[in-house]
Image: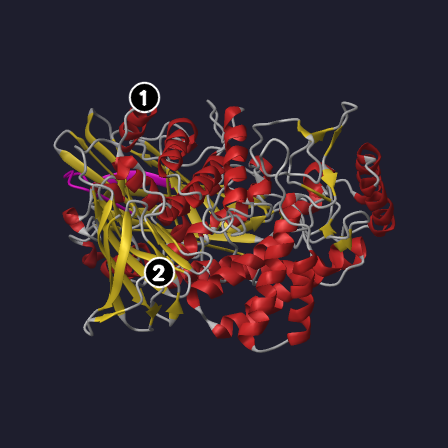
Amino acid sequence: MLAKLQGTAYAAASGAARRATHALRFDKPAGRWMEALPVGNGRLGAMVFGGVTQERVQLNHIELWSGHPSNDDRPETLAALPKVRELLFAGRYAEANTLAQDKMMAPKNSEAFGSYQMLGDLGLEFEHAGNVTNYERELDMAAAEVRVRYRLGMAEYKRTVIASHPDRALVICLETTAPEGLSFRVTLSRDRDAEVGPDGDSVRLAGRPQPSGTAFAAHMRCVADEGQVTPTENGYQVRGARRALIYLTGATDLLADRPAARSRADMEHVVGQPWDAFVAFHQAEHAAFYEAVELELGPLPEPITADARLNAVKTGANDNALTEAYFNFGRYLLIRSSRPGSLPPNLQGLWADGFSPPWSADYHININIQMNFWPAEVCGLGTLHGALFDFAERLKPDGETTARIAYGCRGAAAHYTSNPWGHTALDGNVEYGLWPEGLAWLSLHFWEHYLYSRDVEFLRTRAYPFLKSCAEFTLDYLVTHPVTGKLVSGPAASPENRYRLATGETGWIAMGCAMSQSMAHAVLTQCAQAAADLGTDAGFAKTCHEAVLKLDRLRIGPDGRIMEWPEPFEEVEPGHRHISHLFGLYPGAEIDPRKTPELAEAARKTLAGRLEHGGGHTGWSAAWLVMFRARLGEGDEAHQMLQKLFREITSDNYLDMYTASTDPIFQIDGNLGATAAIVEMLVQSHNDTLRILPALPTAWASGKATGIRGRGGLVVDLAWDDGLVRTAVVRATRDVDCEVIAPPRQRLLGAYERGRNIVAVAGAPSFKAGRTYDLEFAEA
C-alpha cells in the first residue's frame, strides 16, 4: 500500500477551478479551540490546530456520553395540573407559577442526564526546527480535508487530515521533501476514565465515563514509507519517513455492542485501502452532498485569509465572498456531522472540547436541534435529515410514558432538552421546563421531509405514525377556555421568556401562549393532511380538523405586536433571544405577507421591538431573525442582521458563537440556521407558492444559485443581475401545482416547458414530473 502514496497525498478534489469561497485559508496555526478547523464523518470528529512543532488533533465521537436511562416522570405533576389550569384561567398567575414549580417540576437528575464528552487527543511532536516560511492552514470544504503546509529551510512539509464516512476512519497523511525525512512522535490520550495501551499492531484507548455512560474504544495505527516506526506505550515513534499515515477508528456501545471489536474491525478495513482509493471514495461520497447546491454572489474580490475577510466585515466592509464562504461552511458542517444511523448534531454539532461542555452539548429541542436541520431540505441534503428522525423515534417511547404519567394524555410529549438516553420528563424551572411541545416540533420535520420528497412510503411508515402520536397528545392537552370557549393549550411557557404582572411579580407559564397555539395548529393541520394523502384514518383527521377550527389563534395586542401570552403582559426582557410567538412566521406559515397582511405587519412591529432592545445577540437568535426578515420579504433588513451575525457573533474560524465573548461558546445552530436563511432570501416555497428572489438585498445585486430545493419536489436554478431575474429554471421531480410569485420589481410572463414550447398558465403553472421549465419575467 505504501508504494501507492507517491504523488497522491495532496490531490485536491476539484483543483484550482473552484471559487475561493469553497475553502477557509489561514496563515498561522490556531491559538485556541475556537480557531481550529473541523473534520468529521458523522460519528468521528476532530478539531485540527495546525501547529508546526506540536500538533493537537482534538477528537470526538458523537455517541460518547456520560449518564444513563432514568424514569423521572412524577405522578404529582398530573395531580397538580387541574389546579394550575384553574389558577391561570382565574388570572392568579403568581400562584399558578409557584404551584407548578413546586408540584409539577422535578429537580434535574444531572448524573443520569449526563453530558456529551470528548473522545481524547491525538498529539504530534515533530523533531524539526528552524524558521517557518510559507505557512498555510486550510479547510477545503469541497474536498472535506484540512491541510497544513509550511517550509523549513528548503524542505516542504505537508499534512492532510480526512474523516471518511465510507471507511469510518480519521486519517492523517504526513509528507516532507526533507532529505532526512520526517521524525515525530504520535500519541493517543484521554485525561480521564480511560486506559491506553498496545492492541496488536494498534494502540487502543478504551474506557467508560464515570460514574456511568457509554463504553468506548478507539484504535490508532501508524505506517510509514522509507522510515522506521517503533511502537510506544501510547503511540509510535517515527524516524526518517518520507511519508506516514496515521489511522484512527472508534466506536461506543450506545447503539451497538462490542465497541472495541468494531473499532478494531474498522481499523483492519481502512489500513488495507490504498491511499488513492481512500481519498477518491471519501471525496466522491462528500461531493454527492456538497455539490447539490451552488451559490455565487457576484465577482470575487482579491483573495485574503478567512480571518482577515471576517475582520474586514467586522470593521464595516461589505464582502459578499464572506456570505458565500459562510453558506458553504454551514453546508459542510451539516454534511460532516450528520448521518442516518447515528445521533444527530447536538448543540455543538460533532465538535466539543472537554468533559463538561456548555449545557452538556445536549439536545435542546425548543429550537436548537430543529434549527440544525433547517438547511437540510432546501440545500438538497434531505438524506441527512434521517439522523434527526432516528433520534426522534428513539425518544418516542419515553415520550409516551411522560404523556401518560405527567399529563394523563395519549400520544407522546417531551420538553426543552433531551439526550441519547431518552430523557423526556419535566425538570428544572418552569421558565424553560414546562413546555411539552418538543416532540411536536420534531414531528414537523417529518412532514417537511415528505413535502420536499413526496416519499409516500416515508409518510406511511415513519412520518404519519410520529405525527399522529404528537397530534394525540395535542388534542388531549387542549382544553376549552371558560370565557372564550376556544381551545387553548397549557400550561406552558413561551420558551425561556417571562412576563411581569401588575404586582411586580414575574411569571412564565400561561394558557394559550402564541407558540403553543401555533404549534397545535401546525401539528393538527399537518396530521390531518397526512392522513388524507394516505387515504387513511378519516375519523381521526376529522377530529384534528374540527379542533383546528376551535383553536384560539394568534392575536394582535394593543401595541400592534403579536401577543406572546394570552394577556398583554409587560416583558421582563424586551430583547429576549427567543422570539417564540413568531413561530407562525417561521418555521410555521400562519403569518404570510400576502395572505395575512395584518399579522405580517404585527410581526414587523414585534421584530422592531426586539431589536430596539438588543435582540439577536446570540448566534442562533440572529439566524432566526434573518429568517423572519426573509419571510417578510425584507431583503435589506435580513442582510443587515446577517452582517450583525458576522460582525458580532462569529469566531475567526467561522464557527458560530453563543454570544460575543473573549472566551466564546460554540453553538452550531447559528451556522446552520443562517445557511438556511440565505436560501430563504432567494427562494421560498411555502403555502403552495414558489417565490423567486422574495428578499433579495441590494448588496446582492448580481449572482446565481443552482440546486435550491422547493416543496413538492422542485429544483430551482437562478441567475440575476441588477436585482432582476435573468434566467430561472425549474426542474420537477414530482407533479406540482403552485403559484409562482415574481420578484418585487418583476412580473411573471409564463412558464415554458423546455422542448415542448408549451406556455403554462402565467400565475399557477402545473409542473410535471421529469420535465424542465423556463420561467420568464418582465420588469413590472
Residue 143: give x, y in percent of width and height: 27, 51
Q: Which residue lies furthest to the front in this view?
A: 780
Residue occupying image coordinates x 77% and y 40% = 107
Q: Is residue 642 above or below residue 584?
A: above
Residue occupying image coordinates x 28% and y 52% = 747
> Could you tell which of marks 2 and 1 lies nearer the N-terminus?
2
User: Crowding at label 1, few (<14), some or many (≥20) Cα neighbours within 10 Å?
Assistant: few
Between tags 2 and 1, which lies in front?
A: 1
- Magenta-colored stretch includes residue 725: no
Residue 67: give x, y in percent of width and height: 66, 47
Q: In this view, does 99 lie above or below 420?
A: above
Q: Which of 338 and 777 is in front in this view?
A: 777
Q: What stretch is highlighted in magenta?
A: 173-186
Query: Which residue type carries mark 2?
Result: Val
Residue occupying image coordinates x 79% and y 24% = 503
Q: Nearer the viewer, residue 374 or 601?
A: 601
Would residue 428 be seen by someone viewing this image from the given angle? no
Q: Which residue lies furthest to the left in this view?
A: 154
Quadrant in which the N terminus is drawn: bottom left
Q: Which of 89 and 283 is in front in this view?
A: 89
**Image-based side of 693 in relation to 343, left or right:** left
- Magenta-colored stretch includes residue 178: yes
- Tag 2 near tag 1, CB within 8 Å: no
Name the secondary structure under disc 2.
helix
Query: Which residue type carries mark 1?
Result: Thr
Name the secondary structure under disc 1.
loop
Residue 532: give x, y in percent of width and height: 57, 73
**Image-based side of 192 in relation to 139, left or right:** right
Residue topped by disc 2:
270
Residue 315's label in the rendered image is 1
